Amino acid sequence: MNVLTRTWEKLAARELEKSRETAERRWRPKFHAAPPVGWLNDPNGLCQYQGVYHAFYQYSPFDVKGGLKFWAHCTSRDLLHWSFEGTALAPDEPFDCHGVYSGSALVENGQMVLYYTGNVKQAGDYDYIHTGRESNTVCAAGADGFHFDGKKLLMTNQDYPEDLTCHVRDPKVWKQDGRYYMVQGARTAEDKGVVLVFESEDGLDWKYRSRLETEEPFGFMWECPDLYEVDGRTVLSISPQGVEADGLRYNNVYQSVTVFLEEDFRTGKVNGKFRELDAGFDFYAPQSFAAEDGRRIQIGWMGMPDAEEYYTNRTVEDGWQHTLTLPRELSVRDGILCQNPVRELDAWWNVFTPFENTYSETPGDCFELELTEIGESVRLTLAGGLLLSWKKEEGIFWMEFTDKKLGAGRTRRGRRTEKLTDLRVIVDVSCVEVFLNGGKDVFSTRFYPDTEGISARLQAPGSRGRLCLHKEKK
Ligand code: FRU
């Protein structure tokens, strides 16, 4: 550990102590991971190691609006309750001094190896797109899953293809057929988003192998790629920047989409249709991992970069900003990648109130409202100002803030939904995630109720459902 590492650790711990003394607890979720202080963005290094779930995330402890990035670390045994474990990686080397950017974890041979991008902005008059930025690929290993010493610089800009800008980042690494593979997001000099595929025999010495791209550009940069198998399909997940809004689609500043790859990822192209992973306001840069029981679990950043012009987060007043989404189990049904809350959540609810057609209570600030039968329409108002609605004749599911302050500037999002067979609305203090039709469509948003408890008023003639709560056992 060098003197810079020790100094950063001390300063980050001091920031945490200060926040413990003054912290406002309002709007802190109960089962979504959130930073104790400062700013959170992308989930990183997701894995299960020796039975324990580990999630790291992009963390700026000193600035609630972002800034110099560290990896924060948190652990969980049930994917719902997360303990903050401090900072795992700090910007403390010449090759990562302007940010330990996003990446992934590889669990193998009694080690957890973290791969990430070391961001360096050279001093001078640069645009930091075409010149002036180093995007270094770095790894650090730890046998206990908590301490990562001996960072190794694996690749620099010289190791990437020549037709790219300096924007190359976010390595996702996995092992397949006895070899190691890595995908990274990149922006070409012609402003086209692409995914680079690298290959290695030992996880240390990497060679560029091929790229995944569309014929026509789909945005100028693809961030945070992920590539995995679910139910026999190969999924490419990317977070593109620069995609134009198209009717109800692509209405956020940036997007997160998936596409099924029909050919081998090492040789093939991206031919299929992209599908947005989330139709709400707050979802970006998702990553996935394989749990020890074989489930493919995805976690996203429940936030949006560069959205301040449109909407904000009222927790900034309290010195922290953003959360991760609930971990979601991935599956493929009817040719669609489905996301559903991890089954640990179903097991956690222990008080159930069935209802038919209507429901109108203030059940608390953490609950799930579930509809298992649905008629011709649904109108659910949360906290008096977040309306979730659907009418069969219109065939669109809407998430709409009728109270401006509640949504802190968020307005309306919709998704074409001809049929609505089931609905799950999960509320956790300031986080709302809505799952439609067995997880085929999802809407995520933050909201900021000023009341004690969150009201739920439902009118859905012909429906059946239940309200789920967790009560501590005495
Ligand atoms: C996505 C992203 C990544 C980058 C990280 C930096 O939100 O821009 O591409 O590694 O955030 O915090």
Image (cartoon, rainbow, N blue to C red):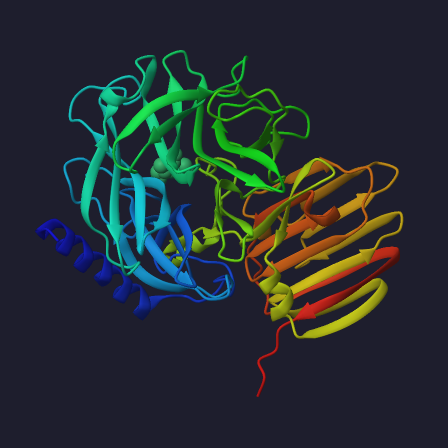
Name which residue lies at 89% across and 51% down.
375
Q: Nearer the viewer, residue 50 or 45?
A: 50
x and y, in percent, of residue 116 in the image: 31, 40
Asked whether, in this view, residue 456 is left or right of residue 65, the answer is: right
x and y, in percent, of residue 19 in the image: 31, 64
Height in image: 468 above or below 311? below
Height in image: 346 above or below 154? below
Image quarter in which the C terminus is found:
bottom right
x and y, in percent, of residue 215 in the image: 54, 13
Regarding residue 66, the answer to whether it shows in the image is: yes
Quarter of the image where one finds residue 88: bottom left
Q: Quadrant of ligand 1?
A: top left
Name which residue lies at 54% across and 23% down.
243
Furthest residue in direction left, as rendered: 3
Q: How many marks?
A: 0
Asked whether, in this view, residue 125 is left or right of residue 160, the answer is: left
Furthest residue in direction front, as rendered: 178
Q: Nearer the viewer, residue 198 or 12?
A: 198
Q: Nearer the viewer, residue 423 or 405?
A: 423
Name which residue lies at 46% across and 66% down.
77
x and y, in percent, of residue 313 in the image: 48, 49
Regarding residue 252, the answer to whether it shows in the image is: no
Height in image: 422 above or below 350? above
Height in image: 344 above or below 55? below
Q: Nearer the viewer, residue 442 or 231?
A: 231
